[in-house]
Amino acid sequence: MVPTSPPLLEHTACGLYCAAGDFYIDPWRPVARAVITHAHSDHARPGHAAYLATPQALGVLRARLGERAAIDTLPYGQSVQINGVDVSFHPAGHVLGSAQVRIEHRGEVWVVSGDYKLDPDPTCVAFAPVRCHTFVTESTFGLPIYRWRTPELMFGEINRWWAENAAAGRTSVVYAYAFGKAQRILASIDAGIGPIICHGAVEVLNRAYRDAGVPLPATSLVTDLPKDFDLTRALVVAPPSASGSPWLKRFGEHSDAFASGWMAVRGARKQRGVDRGFVISDHADWPGLLTAIAESGASRVLVTHGSVPVMVRHLLETGLEADALETEFEGEGEGEGGAEVLVETAAEAESAAEIESTAEIESTAS
């Protein structure tokens, strides 16, 4: 018989705490022992005395936390005991080194998803479902309006836009979160269209990906190029914070775009002030979230950041035990400024989708 109390994880001021093992998962205040799902800054924060992550995440964690951070690694699928609690990492498919955390104590199994997606991504290990009693899931895009197209279609759009700009003598600038999204774009586009230039914040993470064995096309810093270099055929990959900066002026006339799941929301491109919006996300869409939850086999689901009320309501209507779990995770935005800028977009999506969500939830529940 699986024990039901006390819970294996509880919300505290510092983060999600496992009292039985005396460790935290992705804590948001400094703690003695932190188990990290992935290296985005809202999940892997500085100041912890000790970190545990996957080997694939190590390079990015070092780039973000510094060489002095005490980081141990645990390969996917291997288990370690922390004060009698079995802990293991399993692929989450979100970014390089991302993991679901499985914890087991006295026959009870919980899985904390961190951030995840089910779509194929050449830069990280694919999501693998993990059976458990309680599944702690994100819900960044937990509304029925969010349904991603295939990667072939998504990146084909970027290739066509880039090629059209190159033919017209305009530089193409795409804004993407520096860790994960930028590298996924680089690995998925047609590098034969023209040269690729990366902002310094992207390039330092490109190096971590290459060091981890992830193949990326050749990229350059603009400062390393000759002054007379022809930039008109170039694709420039930069973080959202570069928009409107002096750094951007050196590219002259250009067309710009933003790559994010939020681009699925009407008005998001206008809010960003860009020429194009590409609907590309490293988070699961509505069908992906429901698939992951179902494949976990969990009878209880705790929903963290994102469209929490809609997801909880849907899960309750399907007969699962479900509730909200408060965290300080950001979802799509990843500490790059995107989450703050797009708060209105997310709220607009929830408001605009309320009627549609109700209809689709009832349909999928039947």
Image: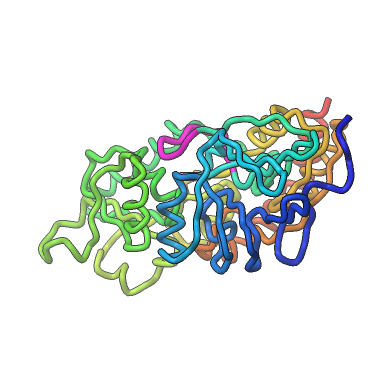
Relative placement, left or right, of 277 versus 300 is: left
Q: Is residue 359 visible?
A: no
Task: Tell me which corner region of the image, top left, top right, bottom left or bottom right, holds residue 310.
Answer: top right
- Residue 120 on the magenta segment: yes
The residue range painted magenta reads 116-125
Task: State the residue in front, 110 or 107.
Answer: 107
- SS majority, magenta: loop
Relative placement, left or right, of 317 versus 167 is: right
Q: Residue furthest front?
A: 83
User: Whole-percent x and y of residue 303?
Assistant: 75, 47
Task: State the residue in front, 44 or 334.
Answer: 44
User: Whole-percent x and y of residue 304?
Assistant: 72, 51
Quadrant assignment for the N terminus? top right
- Residue 108 on the magenta segment: no
Q: Residue furthest top?
A: 366
Q: Specify how the rendered protein is coloured.
A: rainbow
Relative placement, left or right, of 191 versus 331 is: left
Q: Is residue 200 visible?
A: yes
Task: Tell me which corner region of the image, top left, top right, bottom left or bottom right, holds residue 232.
Answer: bottom left
User: Whole-percent x and y of residue 231?
Assistant: 20, 57
Task: State the residue in front, 162 or 110.
Answer: 110
Q: Residue furthest bottom?
A: 246
Relative placement, left or right, of 208 versus 146 is: left
- Taking the spot 67% from the left edge, 37% from the top edge, the residue there is 289
- Above or below, 142 against 44 in this view is above
Quadrant assignment for the C terminus? top right
- Taking the spot 41% from the left edge, 64% from the top edge, the residue there is 67
- Taking the spot 50% from the left edge, 56% from the top edge, the residue there is 71
- Above or below, 362 against 177 in this view is above
- Taking the spot 29% from the left edge, 70% from the top edge, the residue there is 249
